[in-house]
Amino acid sequence: MQRLVTPSAQLSVRGLLTIHSAPSALRRHIDWAIQNIVGADAQVNWQPQSLMVGTFKTKCQWRGCGGSAAEIASTLRSWHYLNFEVLEENENGGELFRFTPELGLHRAVTDLSGAVLLNEFAINNVMQKAFDEDSIRQGLLQAMGTAWDVELERFRSAGMGEPARLHAI
């Protein structure tokens, strides 16, 4: 029997995986999982994460078929102790997956500039469940993944606190 392939799975996409924190013991398992999904060309270089003692961080650019980011996110979320983001981009926009142990997994569709897009279904869902203006605001923030952004922002800006040093020419 032949495997069914969606049209989006035939698209060549590029992506960026950012693991903000991972326990040392999981690094080799994560390397294997990533290389199994996007190929052996994926180079993962781990560095100590200064915000969480005993954890490591990495960034990995990759190329693959459409849906690779979803597969990476599904695989990585099974290790509860990770904080990560996976971005998949194609010529029409892409998808963004964010995960924290406290919040779980969030998926968002993005445009070409990386902005999160809310579709009609998501907005209607918020409107049906909302009772007042505050609950509409909270529902839209949830749909956009604002809580994940807030939680992961501290990792994104880690290491940027060092003052830039100017060198004489």
Image: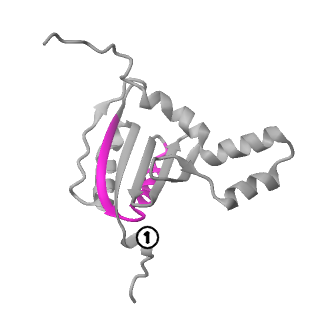
Extreme residue in the left direction:
169
Residue to which mark 1 is pinned: 8
Tell me if residue 78 is in the magenta stretch: yes
Q: Residue at x 51, y 45 (%)?
A: 99
Colour mode? Answer: one colour
Which three-letter amino acid code belongs to the residue tagged 1?
Ser
Task: Provide the residue span drawn in magenta.
Answer: 57-80
Inspect this view and state whether residue 7 appears.
yes
Choose top left, top right, bottom left or bottom right for residue 156: top left
Element type where label 1 sits in the image: helix
Q: Residue at x 35, y 35 (%)?
A: 57
Choose top left, top right, bottom left or bottom right for residue 91: bottom left
Q: Position of residue 148 (x, y in %)?
A: 56, 39
Q: Observer-nearest residue: 28 or 162? A: 162
Q: Is residue 154 left or right of residue 60?
A: right
Q: Observer-nearest residue: 86 or 112? A: 112
Q: Is residue 47 above or below residue 76?
A: above
In the rendered image, the quadrant that contains the N terminus is: bottom left
